């Protein structure tokens, strides 16, 4: 299936007219290293180069969510990925949520290094109440005889996940329709809107005017969502890319697989410029898994995860806190490991790509319950805020109303929480209000040492102690939601 | 044997000794423990001070070094001039060297530090190559600017030369593009400009080939602006890539350093904690030892109280108030220990004493009745109070009313008082009864009279005894006289002189005595010529002369044979010489014929000496007199010579 470099899905809006050109699209590809599922930036690049060297005009629209997180982004805050995108001949970058992982100014700084324009249409810097410096509200690019306008909209919740209310996000059809209208006035023949699912929840597709194609950035198996206007979801660390066939009259989409492409040597060269000296750090073996382990997205965001347990135990061990609770969304490996697998720092960094640090706060049992309630408040959507824990157990029932879903909380031995206060280790992301967590009313235990180190180092140190480790589930989290 | 053991176990001395020994042992043990612990403590503290803390310091400096290195690497990436890059690079090298030497100082066996060293080793080449790329980038930047300037100049020149409207328009556009190229802020804009320039060049190629050729050389030819732009991009990517890697490497170095530091710090903290825990448990131990000692001391006190003090107190009570010790008392004292034995002994004594007391009472009653029925002259006194007076005594003092001591005649009462006060037994010859012509001694004895201490005063008739004594003394005196008198001459004999000598030697005698020693001249010849009887007569005549001339205080002594001696106590030398001279002349004046003497008549020679100092003995003075006599003989006899030591005083 994956071996096929071919059209797997051809949705035809086919018209007799000659095609004006092709538009390649992908998103959510922060991973630098090739993966077993065929994912490889070099192969993607090879595919793009091959298409661009053909006779047809080609545009490569990058859907973003890729400047972070990975093991390098923690250090250079996306610089490497801009260089890689330069080399991949990206024509426009739709600035997405994760691009803002290091704040608005970092995006501005990176925009000067990009050989392509960066677009964001519905977000204003709260300080200036205008577009983010260096970003364009829309861009019009030539595609053969056509002019194609590209716009990008993000969901308002970027303020709770990355920007912490430093931005103003417009989630209304009028705003984006105005931009589309402007682009049209400037001569755009085709309008392509790149956006997120969450934005479309707030702004109905029906209300958008003059959009020819909507590209949804989503970490899923690429697929076409609807025909009119054409809506395609694409993204994730896999070998899939979307190719739009654009003509005067129509646009159609096809999903392509790049696994069989010959990797682009020049791109590998670029990557190696960023990584060739890091083996001494990253290839360090840590421990051997004595049993199988998984870090699957669904598990991390709704149930007890063997990998999550390991990470949380490491954090609790490091901080010496009573409990540890960190969001499942901070773990991004999304894979399974077989018994006997030798974990390296590279694996740990891939699993915990945000880096991040840990903090210890003092919480009452009431506050703890409130935190756990927040963790399961959007569990039905597999939201990243779901909490993996250590040192405590909790049961939840997602069928109950939000705020009343936690059925029971106890310590690791199953005893109720009797003390007035407990120490709880959390991530810096949570402490600063990420995913709408609220720690403004708790006291942080001042311990500079424990909050200086990156989570992946903390976990690596922990794993390094053991020659072999058996990842396991011990009933920390129980889902009591009735199966429907 | 078992009994002995039992006794030892019961012995207070053994038990108290055992307890005190145990306490002392415990103290010694505690002391030894203290010393041991403090040695250990000082050892640990030393180790910390010498090993752990310095390595912590080194680690601290390593951390600082890493931070500086990290900053330097950033500076290199952002450096604006090649010279500044070179300066920074030399600082980077210094910093790396310093770091490595610091790491080298730390434990070589530590795996973390080995890895840290490995990573630090990678940094220098990485930063170096970054700085090289940066230098290249700077160079390309400079070249690019130069080329763009040239292209602009050329465009302007051509613009001035060319008058064709189409060409001018193109050149206008190119000039604008070239100008934008210098100040472009976004790379994608640069790409757009390049695309526009390329388009303009293509247009020029057909309508103005010469200008196209000239501008192509600067723009699209190898080493032209387009080439340099992509070259600059390549270098920029290189710099960025290496900068990122350096950040990662340094980030890891920082983290490793941090981790090693934390581990070492935790180690040191743990050691300190252990020390403090040790100290705490040591203090606990000490407190326990102290409490045990205290308990032992208290129980010892309690034990002593139960076994000793209480019994001692009881013993005191026993001795102060009780007259007898019952078997219960003995049982209380537990006869098996020393106090018990003591009380048992006491019990035996007290029993004996009680018996004796009874005996004494009986005896004193018997004595009372004996006294009352005897004819002894007795009075019993208690102080001045008269308890009893016998009939014979009342008769003796029939003129007096004997109601108390004051009832006796004054002198008798005084004697009684004296004998009572002086505690002497007897006052001899204390009382003379004129009526019965009898002497009485007063004797005193302490007695118990009607259960009270009293003085028994007894008047014993010693008249017969005194008379007998006086008679005896008289007889003794005659005997003594006989024994000391020379039967021929009637002078004292040699023995009396010896007595004098002994008496003086004993310190009895009057000082400044004089000894006059006489010798009959040529007495042997006289005896030979006239016979011993005539000799004895002559000696008697001389003795008479000497006796006649000897003062009453003096003694005339026949010392032996024809040697005669006069001893005068308390004499002056002149007086002694005078007496001697008188005797010598008196003898010669008798004119007893002595044909064999050169003096024709019997004569004596005399040597005189006197006690000059009180310590001079009789024999010494005698000897001096003898020597003087010898001198007198040498001088022709019939003369007096005084002891030479005295001549001066004589003169």
Image (cartoon, coloured by chain):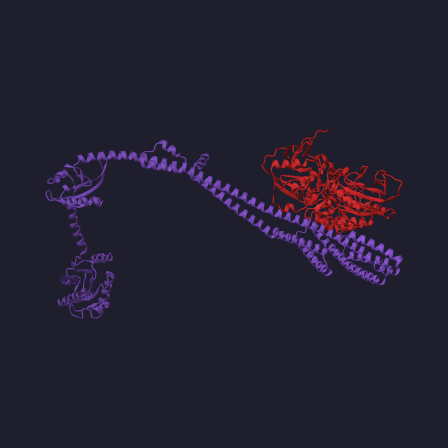
Chain colours: A red, B purple
In which quadrant of the rendered view does residue B133 lie? bottom right
In this rendering, is residue B264 above or below B386?
Answer: below
Question: Residue at horizontal 54%, vertical 43%?
Answer: B280
Front-lying residue, B272 or B181:
B181
Residue B640 image point, x, y percent: 19, 68
Taking the image as drawn, is residue B337 in sight?
A: no
Q: Position of residue B415 (x, y in %)?
A: 17, 45
Q: How many marks?
A: 0
Q: In the drawing, does residue B346 fall left or right of residue B598?
A: right
Question: Where residue B571 appears, x then y in whole percent?
Answer: 18, 63
Which residue is at a point 34% across and 32% down the rendered structure image?
Answer: B326
Q: Is residue B309 left or right of residue A352?
A: left
Residue in front for this viewpoint, B63 or A434? A434
Question: Where the C terminus of chain B falls, by quadrant?
Answer: bottom left
Residue A460: x, y in percent? 70, 44
Task: Decide if residue A87 is on the left or right side of residue B513.
Answer: right
Q: Quadrant of residue B416?
A: top left
Depth check: give the residue in front, A325 or B475.
Answer: A325
- Out of B641 and A376, give the one closest to the viewer: A376
**Res A106 visible:** yes
- Rendered position, B53 above or below A468: below
């Amino acid at each position: 299936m994956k071996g096929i470099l071919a059209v797997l899905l051809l949705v035809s809006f086919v018209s007799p007219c000659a095609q004006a050109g092709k538009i390649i699209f992908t998103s959510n590809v922060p991973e630098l290293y090739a993966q077993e599922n065929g994912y490889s930036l070099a192969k993607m690049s090879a595919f793009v180069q091959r298409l661009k060297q053909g006779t047809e005009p080609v545009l490569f629209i990058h859907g973003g969510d890729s400047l972070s997180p990975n093991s390098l982004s923690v250090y250079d805050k996306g610089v490497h990925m801009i260089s890689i995108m330069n080399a991949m001949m990206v024509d426009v970058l739709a600035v997405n949520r994760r691009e803002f992982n290091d704040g608005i100014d970092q995006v501005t700084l990176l925009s000067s290094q990009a050989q392509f324009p960066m677009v964001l249409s519905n977000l204003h810097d709260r300080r200036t109440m205008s577009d983010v410096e260096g970003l364009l509200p829309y861009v019009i690019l030539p595609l053969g005889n056509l002019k194609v306008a590209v716009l990008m909209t993000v969901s308002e919740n970027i303020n709770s996940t990355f920007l912490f209310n430093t931005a103003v996000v417009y989630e209304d059809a009028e705003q984006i329709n105005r931009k589309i209208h402007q682009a049209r006035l400037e001569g755009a023949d085709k309008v392509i809107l790149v956006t997120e699912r969450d934005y479309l929840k707030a702004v109905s597709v029906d209300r958008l005017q003059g959009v020819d194609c909507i590209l949804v950035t989503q970490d899923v198996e690429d697929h076409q969502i609807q025909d009119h206007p054409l809506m395609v979801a694409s993204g994730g660390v896999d070998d899939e890319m979307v190719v739009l066939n654009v003509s005067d009259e129509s646009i159609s989409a096809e999903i392509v697989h790049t696994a069989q492409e010959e990797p682009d040597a020049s791109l590998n060269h670029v990557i190696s410029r960023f990584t060739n000296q890091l083996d001494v750090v990253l290839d360090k073996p840590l421990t051997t898994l004595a049993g199988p382990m998984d870090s699957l997205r669904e598990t991390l965001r709704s149930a007890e995860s063997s990998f999550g347990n390991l990470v949380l135990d490491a954090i609790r061990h490091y901080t010496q806190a009573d409990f540890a609770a960190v969001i499942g969304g901070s773990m991004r490996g999304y894979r399974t490991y077989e018994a006997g697998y030798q974990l390296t720092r590279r694996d740990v960094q891939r699993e915990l790509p945000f880096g991040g640090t840990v903090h210890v706060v003092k919480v009452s049992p009431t506050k703890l319950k409130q935190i756990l309630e927040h963790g399961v408040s959007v569990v039905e959507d597999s939201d990243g805020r779901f909490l993996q824990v250590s040192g405590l157990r909790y049961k939840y029932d997602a069928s109950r109303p939000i705020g009343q879903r936690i059925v029971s909380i106890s310590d690791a031995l199953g005893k109720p929480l009797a003390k007035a206060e407990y120490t709880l280790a959390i991530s810096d992301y949570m402490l600063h209000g990420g995913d709408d967590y609220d720690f403004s009313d708790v006291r942080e235990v001042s311990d500079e040492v424990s909050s200086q180190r990156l989570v992946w180092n903390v976990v690596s140190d922990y794993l390094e102690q053991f020659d072999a480790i058996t990842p396991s589930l011990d009933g920390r989290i129980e889902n009591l939601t009735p199966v429907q | 044997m078992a009994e002995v053991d039992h006794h030892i176990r019961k012995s207070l001395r053994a038990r108290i000794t055992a307890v005190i020994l145990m306490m002392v042992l415990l103290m010694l043990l505690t002391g030894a423990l203290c010393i041991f612990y403090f040695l250990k403590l000082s050892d640990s503290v030393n180790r910390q001070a010498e090993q752990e803390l310095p390595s912590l310091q080194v680690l601290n400096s390593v951390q600082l070094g890493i931070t500086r290195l990290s900053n330097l690497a950033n500076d290199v990436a952002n450096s604006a001039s090649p010279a500044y890059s070179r300066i920074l690079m030399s600082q980077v090298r210094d910093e790396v060297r310093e770091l490595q030497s610091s790491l080298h100082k730390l434990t070589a066996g530590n795996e973390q530090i080995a890895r840290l060293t490995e990573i630090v080793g990678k940094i220098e080449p990485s930063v170096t190559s970054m700085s090289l790329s940066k230098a290249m980038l700077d160079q390309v930047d400079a070249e690019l600017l130069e080329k763009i300037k040239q292209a602009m100049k050329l465009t302007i020149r051509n613009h001035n030369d060319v008058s064709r409207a189409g060409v001018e328009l193109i050149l206008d556009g190119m000039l604008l593009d070239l100008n934008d190229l210098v100040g472009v802020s976004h790379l994608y804009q640069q790409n757009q400009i390049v695309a526009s320039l390329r388009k303009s060049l293509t247009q020029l190629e057909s309508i103005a080939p010469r200008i196209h050729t000239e501008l192509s050389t600067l723009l699209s030819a190898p080493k032209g602006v387009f080439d340099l732009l992509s070259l600059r991009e390549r270098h920029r990517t290189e710099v960025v890539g290496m900068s990122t890697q350096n950040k990662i490497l340094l980030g890891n170095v920082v983290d490793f350093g941090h981790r090693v530091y934390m581990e070492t710090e935790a180690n040191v903290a743990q050691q300190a904690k252990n020390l403090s825990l040790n100290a705490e448990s040591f203090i606990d131990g000490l407190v326990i030892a102290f409490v045990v000692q205290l308990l032992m001391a208290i129980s010892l006190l309690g034990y002593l109280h139960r076994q000793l003090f209480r019994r001692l107190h009881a013993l005191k009570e026993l001795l102060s108030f009780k007259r007898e010790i019952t078997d219960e008392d003995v049982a209380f004292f537990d006869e098996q220990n020393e106090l018990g034995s003591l009380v048992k002994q006491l019990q035996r004594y007290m029993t004996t004493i009680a018996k004796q007391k009874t005996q004494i009472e009986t005896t004193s009653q018997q004595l009372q009745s004996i006294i009352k029925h005897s004819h002894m002259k007795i009075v019993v006194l208690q102080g001045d109070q008269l308890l009893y007076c016998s009939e014979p005594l009342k008769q003796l003092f029939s003129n007096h009313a004997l109601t108390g001591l004051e009832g006796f005649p004054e002198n008798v009462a005084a004697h009684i008082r004296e004998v009572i006060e002086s505690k002497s037994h007897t006052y001899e010859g204390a009382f003379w009864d004129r009526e019965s012509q009898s002497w009485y001694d007063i004797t005193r004895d302490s007695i118990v009279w009607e259960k009270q201490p009293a003085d028994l005063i007894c008047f014993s008739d010693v008249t017969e005894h005194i008379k007998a004594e006086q008679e005896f003394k008289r007889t003794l005196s005659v005997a003594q006289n006989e024994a000391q008198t020379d039967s021929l001459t009637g002078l004292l004999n040699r023995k009396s002189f010896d007595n004098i000598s002994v008496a003086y030697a004993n310190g009895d005698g009057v000082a400044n005595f004089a000894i006059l020693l006489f010798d009959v001249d040529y007495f042997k010849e006289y005896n030979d010529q006239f016979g011993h009887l005539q000799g004895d007569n002559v000696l008697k005549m001389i003795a008479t002369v000497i006796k006649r001339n000897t003062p009453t205080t003096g003694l005339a002594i026949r010392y032996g044979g024809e040697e005669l001696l006069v001893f005068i106590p308390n004499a002056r030398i002149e007086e002694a010489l005078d007496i001697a001279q008188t005797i010598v002349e008196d003898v010669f004046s008798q004119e007893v014929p002595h044909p064999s003497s050169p003096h024709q008549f019997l004569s004596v020679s005399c040597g005189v000496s006197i006690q000059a100092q009180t310590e001079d003995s009789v024999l010494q003075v005698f000897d001096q007199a003898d020597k003087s006599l010898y001198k007198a003989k040498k001088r022709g006899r019939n003369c007096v010579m005084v002891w030479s030591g005295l001549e001066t005083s004589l003169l």
